[in-house]
Structures are given as C-alpha cells and as structure tokens.
Amino acid sequence: MSPEPNLRAAALDSAASMIIPAHVGIIMDGNGRWAEKRKLIRSQGHLEGLKAAKRIVKAASDAGVRFLTLYVFSTENWKRASEEVGFIMGLVKQYLRGELDFYRENHIRIRHAGDPAGLPPDIARELESACRETCSFSGLQVILALNYGGRDEIVRAARKILDAAGNGGMPLITEKTFHSFLDNPDVPDPDLIIRSAGEYRTSNFLLWEGAYSEYYVSDILWPDWTETEFDGALKAYRERGRKFGGAR
Ligand code: IPE
Ligand code: IPE
Ligand code: MG
C-alpha cells in the first residue's frame, strides 16, 4: 500500500538533505514484457503503461519536480508492427484529450520534444493544441518525447543553425549557441534519468542534455510503477555525489 499523500509529503520533507531533482527524464520501458508475462497482447501493456504514466505525473507534481520528460515513442519505434504503432498513437491522442481537466486542476503544462513533422497529422494537431491550452500553467512541465531521438534532435539543431545563418556565413558555434537550437532550450538538463525494466542503455534519449545526468535503472516493468518506485528513484538520487568533472 502506498502511504497517504500527506504522509508521503512528510516523508519527502523530512529527509535531512532533501534535494528534489528539477528535471527528471524517464525511459518508460517494459510494457511488452509486462503483457507477455500475463499472456496478453502487447497493446494491453501499453494501456497499463499509460496508467502508470498518469500515476507518475501526479507523483512528480506532488514531489515538486519542475520538469518531467517522458520517453513515449522514439524515432526507432516506427520499426514496430503497424498495429502496435497505431495503438500507441491512439493512446497518445486519448491521453492528450482526456487529461485536460487534470492538467488544469494541477497547473500542468504539456510540451513536446521530437520532430512534429514526422507525426501523423491528427496527433501533431492534438499535441499542438494541448501545448497551447496549457502554456500559461506554472506547475510541473511534462515534456512528451514523441517521435524523439537524441541524434535526430542534434541533426535538426544543426540544420536550424544553417537555416538561421542563411547567406550571412556561418556563426561561431559554441556549446551555448548549439544548445539554443535544441527542442526545448529553456528547459534545464535532466538531473536524473530513470529507466524501468532493467536495460542499461540510453536508447537515443536526451543524448546532448543527459551528458551529466544521474542514471537510475530499475528492474520493475513500467506498468507496475507507482509513486513508491518513483520515490525510490528520488531517494537514490539524493544519495549521489555529482561532480560534473570536477574534483572533490
Ligand atoms: C516501452 O515498452 C514502450 C515503447 C517503447 C513505446 P516496450 O514496448 O519497449 O516494452 P518491452 O521492452 O518490449 O518490454
Ligand atoms: C526506448 O525503449 C523507447 C521508449 C521507451 C519510448 P525501446 O524498447 O524502444 O528501447 P530498446 O529497443 O530496448 O533499446
Ligand atoms: Mg522496450
């Protein structure tokens, strides 16, 4: 049983060296394995994965996380069977439409990372409308990484730099200027990147932004995630010593 919300808040508050990561990224993996274990079709796993995502958005908002990037669909996930891809896109649409009241109540802002041009037009429209309708909300910012690949983001940034330069010659490229052409340049780098379902790889997630992120890998399959697992990741983060290349 999860603790009551006020007990959970108290538990989070009472940690002597409480450090809540400003930005958490999550590679929500293991939906297929969750379904296979139960002899269900993969779609059922994605459906349960969506419920877990809703639980974790609430948990992150309650914990005071400011930015939460959810890896929903990668640039490589198009390789999957068209039925699975279609089902996931349908779920995304349902989520964007169905959660608007929840975003309003919790002041949650929805944003996108990834290439909107590669999305089915109805999904791109729905995403744009959710981003627009929530753009003034000042609570947790949920960044949906959808048709997202770290390499693709870097390549698109390089193209934007060339476009912006036009015929005026190449600007001086520094890390700072390059960063300003990424999908969400105002969002701080993720402090913590969580991966469910036990794989130790980035799978093309936030390659630039995650240069100094703390990684937390859990064997728990994504559909089984509750605030207890999320709090476990926050606790592990608090115990890390971040050095950013410096000496201590
Ligand atoms: C993550 O779960 C969801 C997406 C990548 C869209 P998977 O579908 O990758 O689940 P596994 O890895 O097959 O268990
Ligand atoms: C990463 O999971 C992508 C998302 C969670 C959206 P994958 O299941 O696609 O990654 P690999 O194939 O195991 O590396
Ligand atoms: Mg997977």
Image (spheres, rainbow, N blue to C red):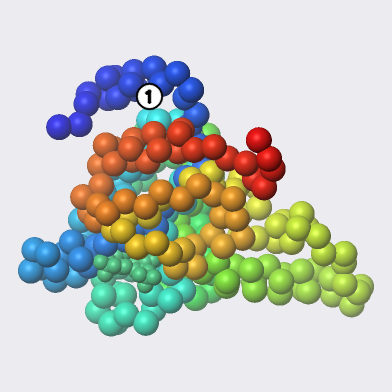
Residue under pointer 1: 12
- x 8%, y 63%: residue: 38
Q: Quadrant of ligand 3?
A: bottom left
Work out whether 220 lies above or below 126.
above
At x 77%, y 73%, the residue is 163
- Is there any visible trace of residue 92 in the rendered image? no
Q: State the image quarter where residue 235 is shown.
A: top left
Q: In terms of depth relative to the viewer, which is nearer, 13 or 142? A: 13
Q: Residue at point 34% right, 35% down?
A: 231
The total number of labels drawn is: 1
For label 1, count other residues whose C-alpha is less than 10 Å away and answer few (under 14), some (14-19) or many (20+): some
- Queried on whether the Cβ of the residue with tag 1 lies below 8 angstroms from ligand 2, the answer reads no
Name the residue nearer the viewer: 245 or 28. Answer: 245
The N terminus sits in image quarter: top left
| Residue 125 relative to residue 2: left or right | right
User: Does 166 appear above or below 209?
Assistant: below
Amino acid carrying mark 1 in the image: Leu
In percent of the image, x 47 and y 24: which residue is there?
18
Extreme residue in the left direction: 39
Q: Nearer the viewer, residue 110 or 81?
A: 81
In the image, taking residue 185 as reference, residue 237 lies left or right, namely left
| Left/right of residue 92 with respect to residue 119 in the rendered view | left
Q: Is residue 45 left or right of residue 109?
A: left
**Residue at the far front in the pictured view:** 248
What element does badge 1 sit on? helix
Viewer-nearest residue: 38 or 90: 38
* Horizontal and vertical percent position of residue 171: 87, 67
Q: Which corner quadrant of the image does residue 73 belong to?
A: bottom left
Residue 85 picture location, percent across and down: 31, 75
